[in-house]
Amino acid sequence: MVNSRVETAAVAVTGGSVGAVRSCAGCGGRISDRFLLFSMDRYWHTRCLKCSCCQAQLGEIGSTCFSKGGMILCKNDYIRLFGHSGACSACGQSIPASEMVMRAQGNVYHLKCFTCATCRNRLVPGDRFHYVNGTIFCEHDRPGGALLSSHLTPLQSNTLLPDQKD
């Protein structure tokens, strides 16, 4: 089941209990380690709770992790993929993890929301645009006059892929 809701979960390190048999949510194996992680209402080997993107072991890099669209993410990758809020910078609505997005200056947009502020034309990959004080303009509507090739930013498109499970 793909969940487009954002969850922030604490990563708790606990000691293994004598007699308690726990299965790891990552590998499915029995957890007999001295320490185990508890996150998102499941138990994990310390080596199995990893960021879906960078593969960092989340118990080693912090006390929070993020879950969206079936992916488990460290804070840096969550912000890289979904922006600071997980919402479109134009309309403020949530962006499903499986949806393609447009990016500009660290902001993330729905494809339909990535439009010129003046003419409202939708910009697509390959179009040139200007990003002025947080506002997007097509190459024809840049405030302040003539185009300067050194100020043009190529448009980028990123596809977010669902988590692959073994």
Image (cartoon, grey):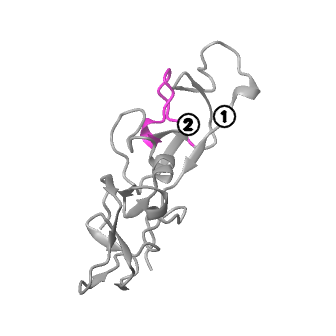
Q: From this viewpoint, which residue is outermost toward the top? A: 144
Read off the magenta span. 109-124
Asked whether residue 76 appears in the rendered view, the answer is yes
Q: Is residue 140 above or below residue 164?
A: above
Chief SS of the magenta region: loop
Asked whether residue 51 appears in the rendered view, the answer is no
Q: Position of residue 99 (x, y in %)?
A: 42, 53
Image point 59% across, 20% down: which residue?
Answer: 141
**Disc 2: which residue:** 104
Q: Between 72 and 11, which is closer to the camera in this rendering?
A: 11
Mark 1 residue crowding within 10 angstroms, few (<14) / some (14–19) / many (20+): some
Image point 41% across, 62% down: which residue?
Answer: 72
Q: Position of residue 35 (x, y in %)?
A: 38, 74
User: Amino acid type of disc 1?
Assistant: Thr
Helix, strand or loop status at disc 2: strand
Image point 44% across, 74% down: which residue?
Answer: 48
**Disc 1: which residue:** 153
| Sequence order check, earlier mark of 2 and 1 | 2
Image point 38% across, 41% down: which residue?
Answer: 87
User: Amino acid type of disc 2?
Assistant: Ala
Marks 2 and 1 close (CB-CB < 8 Å) = yes
